[in-house]
Image (spheres, rainbow, N blue to C red):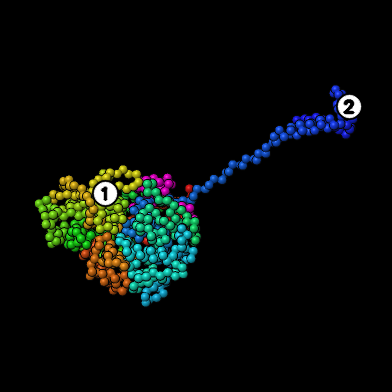
Amino acid sequence: MGRGPVLPGPGGGAAQEERVKGSGGTVGPASLRAVLILLLAGLLAACVNEPAPQVVPPAPAPSTAATPEPTTVTVGVPSLGAGFNPHLLSDQSPVTTALSTLVLPSVFRPDAEGTLQLDQTIATSARVTSTDPFTVSYELNVQASWTTNAPIAAEDFVYLWDRMRSEPGTVDAAGYRLISDVRSRAGGKAVDVVFSQPYPQWQQLFSGLLPAHILKDAPGSWTGALANGLPASGGPFRIASVDRARGEVVLTRNDLYWASPTTLDRIVLRAVDDSTMVDELRSGDLDAALPESDPTVSQLLAALGPAYRTQQAPQPVVTSLAFRSDTGPLADVRVRQAVAATLDREALRTGVAPGAVAADAFGLAPSEPGYAPTAPSGAPARPDPAAAQRLMLAAGYVRDAQGRWGIGGRPLRLVIGAAAERHDDVRLAEAVATQLDAAGIGTTVVAPPAADLFVQPEVPATPPTTTTPTPPDTASGAPTTAPPTTTRPPGRATTTAPARTVPSTTVPSTVPSTTGPPTSTTAPPASGPLRADVMVLPRPVGGDVGARYASDYGCPQPVPGGTTAVAASPTRFCFPALQSLLDGLVAGTAGADTQAVVERVLWAQLPVLPLYQPVGLVVSTPAATESTDISPGPLSTGPFTGAQRWRTPSS
């Protein structure tokens, strides 16, 4: 503020008046008061016009704490698979097994030795409460809920039971078809399951429960809603994202989980091919990987050195050839036997899956306790061209001048189907077609979606997608007529070819040949829907072997409330003389030799031809081995068993 005029001081008004007079006149008291008022007004105006200084708060100190990166374990997988419903044949894959283990609730889970134990985060009690009728009562954990905040309750039991007994293409449905009622108590937090007969293996049921409150009223939800994720979680992890374009599934901690929380923030499943997998393990972009076992992969892994742990991991499936038994050429058991006698099972295995283990039984898989080969000494366990010819002639087929089989003037042609999403299966279908073509049987190979192949009676004539054929690998035992190598995502160039139709081939001998490349002419590609006479079928293994026999080889069952029969398997096989034996195995009342009798009947009837059990590997970096101790795990839950206790690998 500027300096103002001097005001009258203690000396009184006379002195001040004299000073004013000296300026050139006399000023009276009234005038002096007016002057003072004017001076005060100016003083106040000067104070108002000068702005007050602004108080500026000090700038905050820059933050030095960065948001921590989420703790993550990244695991490489061969592919994401067709979908994520663990109860469908079409969706069987290592990723589906992982998601079922980490995201979906199960009443019983296997321990480290594979013995089923009650999961008390889901049910606090499960026991047989009546024998007439046979009833199992479940008391559910009152805290157990889905990530939508809906309780895990009786309606989830009802939904799974209803779908398993009425949908085709399901896994081990026989036990569910023995249930006559599912009753709710305690507001849905207690369940009574009533059976039509005693079922000793009831603990195998109600694993991988699905959120009924989301799925039960959605059309097509059994397959469609689970094709690209799971809509809710009832486990320690939840699905955060599924990116098929990038080949990646991201799991994050389920913050609503009522039991012990996971140690990790995230688990990432990433689809990688074999060479990329090794590079990413070396660089640390992958902490672990689940490749298929074969000599090429083993050679690539050897370059990583002994610090990287590699473990064998048998897969919970047996790869088989399923023969359509209700209609078409293979409805005649003699033609099924002839086709099986034509095929070289060992050449198929070594050419397509050299790391797999030959499977020579219908019930148990080679990795299961109690497995023993039951295959006969000759055909169909081993190729027998002479036996194949006798069977074809007995069925009324004849060979023309070019050595091609036909009947009534029509050439025999079989449609061989493999799921488009299962790339090794497509390679196997091509190899089967090559062997049959060399033996005078025409073939057409199609690769429709898995959900169509294993459910629909007819499938679209979708051509397989292949790359340029690879040279035969004689060191690994691949056949000299090696099929084209099927593309495997991600990132490999592909070409789309027409459906593989194998036309007439010149065969000089009257005995069907299983070796040597055919001489073919061009035939038009198939069009319109086709019946798949032969399917490459992944048959799940593990659990109750009696229910497995009945599910895979039992006669179609009536739909509850209707008259339409539900096919027990994609083969639509039914042999009434066998059904009573299968029923006894399910009920636990069969004699000691019943399983052996069933095996002999199946080798004679051949609804499927078992080939091999695929074997994968569990590879981990030194850091991941220490922080996760990842292992193959029990057959039904796989390498992600116990992943809620994994820690992030140290860098």
Q: Residue 122, position in %: x, y?
A: 45, 64
Q: Nearer the viewer, residue 623 or 156?
A: 156
Of circles 1 and 2, the one toward us is 2
Residue at image x 27%, y 46%? 466
Q: Which circle marks residue 599 in the picture?
A: none
Q: Residue furthest top?
A: 24
Closer to the camera, 35 or 574? 35
Image quarter of residue 219: bottom left
Region rendered in magenta: 263-292
Circle 2: residue type: Glu
Q: Taking 475 as reference, is 245 left or right?
A: right
Give the percent coordinates (x, y) of residue 33: 83, 32
Q: Which residue is mark 1?
A: 464
Graded by Cα atoms within 10 Å as few (under 14), some (14 to 19) or many (20 or more), the crowding at tag 2 reads few
Q: Which residue is mark 2?
A: 18
Image coordinates for residue 337, horizontal then vertical, percent: 19, 61
Can you say whether 129 is above or below 25 in the image?
below
Q: Residue at x 30, y 60 (%)?
A: 169
Q: Quadrant of the N terminus?
A: top right
Where residue 331 sits in the image (x, y, percent)? 19, 61
Quick one: SS at disc 1?
loop
Inter-mark Cα distance, 1 to 2: 121 Å
Instruction: Evaluate whether residue 145 shows in this view.
Output: yes
